[in-house]
Image (cartoon, rainbow, N blue to C red):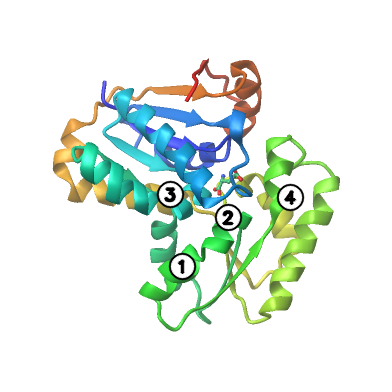
Amino acid sequence: MKSIGIFDSGYGGLTILEQVRRRLPQYDYLYLGDNARAPYGTRSFDVVYEFTLQAVRRLIDMGCPLVILACNTASAKALRTIQQTFIAQERPDCRVLGVIRPTAEVVGTLSPSRHIGVIATEGTVRSESYDLEIRKLWPDAVVTGLAAPMWVSLVENGEYDRPGADYFVRDSIERLLALDPAIDTIILGCTHYPLLLHKIKQYTPAHIRLVPQGQYVAASLEDYLHRHTDMDARLSRGATCQFFTTESPTRFGEQASLFLGGNSIDVQRIQL
Ligand code: DGL
């Protein structure tokens, strides 16, 4: 079996997996969440790189010729180096893709004013990856980033639906809009955030467009596979999905079902 590997620091990548499977249900998927070491968002460049490389190696060893880093922090801090070193030197037959580029490609078409806000983890915001990628494609864009460190914790701890989350959601939206009141589009630049979407909508002025990434990553993957027929031909098509976590499989299964519309799943634990 040759699966598409989907990697995230924890549960967030499940929001990407769901959209990818909806669009491309025929392929086999292997999801890996490094829950034992999440969150990545506050970790240093070197540590995120090291952890992400371990995960990519493992997914490739498990039979994934194509790996998606369904984590903005890993995409921002590790993707380029992994492509240029590990893939280029050790596994030129494999490919690793991220989630920032597909989002940057589309956001200019969604924002008439080109004043774009990005809410993400501290690591993603500090890396300035969104600013760089967006301005490469949309040179007139004004990109303002804001780290919302509490948002991932609210999701990882199952608090995203509770009243306590409102304060942190409202506060971050208000702070972002105070930095640039002309923002008309906000990228939810962390794969955990779609779970907070209804609260984010509640505190965001109606004229502002919110951009969760899943559908754009899925469309971009479909386009990639159309353009790279060699890779496409190597992937197996059994419509399966296997789940792995570095933490407790029981807890992963319980939490993951919240992300996957209540469907229960089989999960195995692995060590990286
Ligand atoms: N889901 C990850 C992202 O998209 C971050 C969560 C974390 O901090 O580990 O950036």
Mark 4 neighbour class, 10 Å CA radius: few under 14, some 14 to 19, many 20 or more: few
* Residue 271, horizontal then vertical, whole percent: 50, 21
Note whether 111 is above or below 227 in the view shown.
below
* Residue 144, horizontal then vertical, whole percent: 59, 73
Image quarter hosting the N terminus: top left
Residue at mark 1: C-beta within 8 A of ligand 1: no
* Dot placed on the residue nearer the N-terminal end, 2 or 3: 3
Q: CA distance from mark 2 to mark 4?
A: 13 Å
The residue nearer to you, when weighing 200 against 45, is 45
What label does residue 150 carry, if any?
4
**Residue at 64 percent of width and 73 percent of height:** 207
Q: Residue furthest front?
A: 46
> What type is the residue that disc 2 sits on?
Gly
**Residue at 75 percent of width and 70 percent of height:** 175
What label does residue 123 carry, if any?
2
What label does residue 107 carry, if any?
1
Mark 2 neighbour class, 10 Å CA radius: few under 14, some 14 to 19, many 20 or more: many
From the image, state whether disc 3 or disc 4 is nearer to you.
Answer: 3
Residue at mark 2: C-beta within 8 A of ligand 1: yes
Count of marks overlaid on the render: 4
